[in-house]
Amino acid sequence: MIELYFWSTDNGRKARHMMEESGLPYTPRPVNLQKKEQFDPEYLKISPGHKIPALTDDDGPGGNRITLCESGAILKYLAEKSGNGMYPEDPVARIKVDQWLFYGSAQFTTLAQQYGLFKIRFGQDVPPALEHYKNVLTEMFGMYDKHLADNEYVAGDYSVADVSCYADVHTYGPEEHIGLGDFPNLKRWHDAIEARPATQRGWASLD
């Protein structure tokens, strides 16, 4: 059985989203960051850097129990284990998925989080920093929009690569942030993923 440790952050949401897409049975384990539960000594045995998401799987490779942290690694692990096509078997297709999976996890989310820090969480008004990261995120939205003009999904077919970047488009796509009005291809992509049952389950309230 898989136990998924997460919270309602962009990385936490994408892990839960991928968990639902995988179709694998799991037990959700919310880690309340506001209560500092990520510093619990037992949790640190799973995620030494006290970050979410993380997971344990009693039926890992070779039947071994494994622990795993880092959202990109978790997404890839779940997509591979599910065998449902979200991480393709074809080596050439995998290269393309890997490119966008790693870009979404390491580049896009990292910079989107900086926008979110200065826009929402910082508690102080720092206009130059906010303007910088808003411009960066707007440019990245534009890059995705241009790419999606010729691709239904970021790596061709729907895959784990889409899950890796959906959370931040969904979070910062509303008009009070970046907005999707100037990015029709990105909006089409976002709305198609938003309508998926697995997405609805993955983004359901933690209550």
Image (spheres, rainbow, N blue to C red):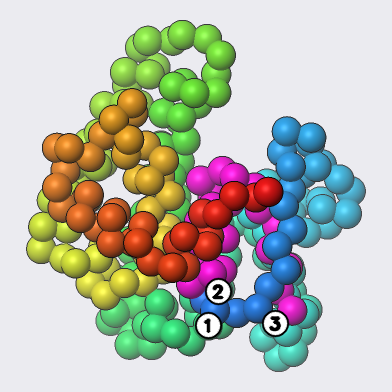
Residue 102 found in image quarter: bottom left
| Residues at marks 3 and 1, CA–CA distance in whole angstroms | 12 Å
Viewed as shown, does residue 10 lie left or right of 162? right
In the rendered image, which quarter is residue 37 located in?
top right
Q: Residue at x 37, y 37 (%)?
A: 172
Which residues lie in the magenta part?
A: 1-21
Q: Position of residue 9 (x, y in %)?
A: 56, 43
Question: Residue shown at 47%/60% (left/top)?
Answer: 200
State yes or no: residue 6 in magenta.
yes
**Amino acid type for the residue under numbered disc 1:** Ser
| Residue that carries the numbered disc 2 in the rendered image | 78
Would you name the residue on which mark 1 appears? 82
Mark 2, Cα crowd under 10 Å, few <14 / some 14-19 / many 20+, is many
Q: In the displayed structure, would residue 113 be above or below residue 102? A: above
- Going by the numbered disc 2, the residue's amino acid type is Leu
Residue at 44% x, 68% y is 197
Q: Vertically, is 78 above or below 50?
A: below
Mark 3, other Cα within 10 Å: few <14 / some 14–19 / many ≥20? some
Residue 97 in picture, x, y percent from top left: 34, 70
The disc labelled 3 sits on which kind of residue? Answer: Gly
